[in-house]
Amino acid sequence: MDNKTAVTSSDTQTSSVSHPGPAPSEQEIATRAYEIFLSRGATDGADLDDWLQAERELTAKMNETPKARSTTA
């Protein structure tokens, strides 16, 4: 059972590092994470959650097709 946990952990690390398409810069992620932090009332303790949410949002936005972007704008 421990082997399965180790494999899952390894797979998670690998998949989070390599993702298809363009990736946002650290500065873009930091800026968005700060906006999320402020929108939560600037309470401490969720910095990693804010960072990961910002990364997901920006990556998804960057990977939208141009057609999808024009219809939502």
Image: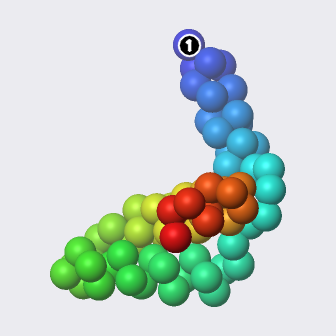
Q: Horizontally, is 35 left or right of 25 in the view?
A: left
Say above or below: 45 vs 49.
below
Look at the image and name its color scheme. Answer: rainbow
Q: Decide if residue 63 is in sight here.
A: no
Please name the residue shown 41% across and 62% down the image: 49
Amino acid type, callout 1: Met
Between 51 and 5, the residue placed more toward the observer is 51
Image coordinates for residue 15, horizontal then vertical, percent: 72, 42
Say above or below: 57 vs 15.
below
Please name the residue shown 68% across and 65% down the image: 62
Between 55 and 62, the residue placed more toward the observer is 62
Please identify the quarter of the rendering in which residue 10 is found.
top right
Please name the residue shown 62% across and 56% down the image: 68
Q: How many numbered circles are shown? A: 1
Q: Decide if residue 39 is in sight here.
A: yes
Q: Horizontally, is 32 left or right of 26 in the view?
A: left
Looking at this rendering, what residue extends furthest in the front direction?
71
Image coordinates for residue 22, horizontal then vertical, percent: 79, 64
Which residue position is annotated with label 1? Answer: 1
Q: Horizontally, is 47 left or right of 69 in the view?
A: left
Please name the residue shown 61% across and 63% down the image: 69
Image coordinates for residue 31, horizontal then vertical, percent: 51, 86
Say above or below: 6 vs 16.
above
Q: Quadrant of the N terminus?
A: top right
Q: Horizontally, is 56 left or right of 63 in the view?
A: left
